[in-house]
Amino acid sequence: MPAGRGARLLRSPGFAVGAAIVGFAAIVALLAPWIVPYDPFAIDLDRRLVPPSFMEGGDPRNFLGTDQLGRDYFSRLIYGTRISMVIGVLTVITSGLIGITLGILGGFYGGKVDDAVVFAITTRLSIPAVLVALAVAALRGSSFMLVVLVLGLLLWDRFAVVARSTTMQIRNLDYVAAAWCAGVSRWWVLTREVLPNIATHLAVVATLEMALAILLEAALSFLGLGVPPPLPSWGLMISEAKEYMFFSPWVIIVPGAALFVLVMGVNLLGDALRDMMGTDLSR
Amino acid sequence: MLRFFVRRFAVAVLVALTVLTLAFMLTRLSGDLAISIAGPNATAADVEQIRQVYGLNRPLYVQYLDWLGRALQGDFGESYFFRDRVAKLIAGRMPVTVTLGLVGLSIALVVSLPLGILAAVKEGTWVDRLVGVFAMIGQAMPSFWLGLLLMIVFGLQLAWLPISGVESWDGFILPGVVLAFSAIPSLTRLTRSGMIEALASDYIRTARAKGLTRLSILVKHGFRNAAIPVVSIAAVQLGFMLGGSIVIETVFALHGVGYLAWESISKNDFPVVQAVVLVLALIYIGLTLLADLLNAVLDPRLRTG
């Protein structure tokens, strides 16, 4: 990456805001057990649905109020950051490994290998992801690791598409040819010449997929087949609170807003990276 | 041209067959399907009986071929819960889902085409940036959350629209808006980039030189060319929307195919789940095929391979 581009990236306001949001979320996720004011699982049925402290009827002891079981909402929100971040990162790693491997192989070898890769991508795209994830969770019983695994196995398509097309663009360039001439192995060319040169494109895809994974986990948990209770997934918090939303709208506004801001932050990072490269991969 | 069509069609058929196989494998993921159907309180005799009735005691490949043969004829078996033909169930729920999808796509197009064109014409100004921010907000918005918020505001506080069900046409408005939000960001960006490219091209300069009006240049020369990718992406988006309607149908209690799938998943009614996965996948395959063919007809440069 030329220095000029990097400097432009750091100056862009979108990057600054995105990095601040994602960085903050990462710190909160890491330090969750030490910064929560209360145990996020502690039930107190005498103090249910207490509004946030800054609202009418609020209690200064619970900054964001309590949920329908009297659990401290702020503490649950903090632990929820951990769930979203871990799911986002693990999904990107799993789907990235699958998609990038397939994409590079297809783009590099072409011919029959490429046909097979394109076929795999087409098939994957035609499968309704949310529905299949729900069905698998229902069949195998939902758990945290299952959500990661299912999302990882479903969201690799964009990695494969981008890795394939960028590899195709560079496979015949001079520096790759030079490496061949130097007599290095195929593995060396793929990992030392091809991969580093498509890495920034893949980073953009990684942000898109991370945002998608976080949203999908929330949707699955909202439908009751994602992260199982009592874990405080933001989607699950919204689902559990939704019968009270007409009387106390904040119960769904709080976790939803957290979800929205985090996804926005991840997308801002991705957009800034894409602007830096001056290409449009979002479609 | 004919060679392209045949090849593209063959790929679609192959993908469809693969999806059929995957859908079969999906329900066998649980290990023993009979135990899942029987539920937690079943005795060993119950499970054995279910195995007999549903033919689960046959070798796997026999079950697969039997299932495949029936599925290809549109026979997806019988629902365990509804005690009805799966194909009939899905056909009965399809109108709601398709209507929702079309309403969603229409709203998405009505919003994103003008916004995309506006952003392209005002490229680099604050208008362009505002449209970008709007697209970004749409992209980060969790659909089920947006649905609940709209229900609170328009259903309860303003009491303008029904919050669930589709007894009348206005029941489709809120879910349609939510569904549209999933397509607006990409359609807006695509229209914008297509228009920018078109406006920078030689034929626009020629049109300007001829002294045509601004509007005529924008619509007749610019948008016509920018619309080619938008048309095909819109077809693909419709496929995605139908697949994603499960969340929105559940939020708004719309009894479409997505809601049927959700009910069936929670009741371990696997033939229905399997069939919905298949039908949605087949619709998507059909729509992408249509998009590719449409693209080839509209833009001869794409007719390769």
Image: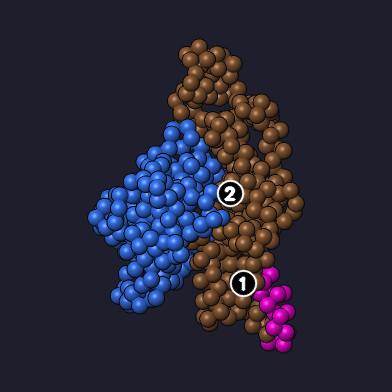
Chain letter of the residue carrying label 1: B
Q: Mark 2 points at which residue?
A: B251
Q: How is the image coloured?
A: by chain
Q: Is residue A98 left or right of residue A188?
A: right
Question: Which of the two residues, B131 or A274, is positioned nearer the viewer here?
Answer: B131
Tell me which residue sits at (40%, 45%) in the image: A45
Does residue A83 appear anywhere in the picture? no
Q: Is residue A12 left or right of residue B270?
A: left
Q: Main secondary structure of the magenta part?
A: helix
Measured from the top left, where is residue A150 in percent x and y?
Answer: 43, 42
Q: Distance between the residues labelled 2 and 1?
A: 28 Å
Tell me which residue sits at (48%, 35%) in the image: A138
The verdict on a common chain for dots 2 and 1 is: yes
Tell me which residue sits at (30%, 59%) in the image: A28
When the figure is inspected, residue B198 is found, relative to residue B167, above or below; the finding is below
Question: Which of the two residues, B279 or A32, is positioned nearer the viewer here?
Answer: A32
Question: Which of the two residues, A263 or B225, is positioned nearer the viewer here?
Answer: A263
Q: Name the residue under label 1.
A: B115
Q: The brown chain is which one?
A: B
Looking at this view, name the residue that lies furthest to the right: B168
> Does residue B292 show up magenta in the picture?
no
Q: The blue chain is which one?
A: A
Measured from the top left, where is residue B280 in percent x and y?
Answer: 61, 42
Q: Residue A102 — which label?
A: none
The tag earlier along the polypeptide, 2 or 1, is 1
Looking at this view, name the residue that lies furthest to the top: B45
Tell me which residue sits at (58%, 19%) in the image: B54
Q: Which amino acid does label 2 sit on?
A: Val
Q: Which range is magenta?
A: B209-225
Measured from the top left, where is residue A120 in percent x and y?
Answer: 49, 44
Q: Which amino acid does label 1 sit on?
A: Leu
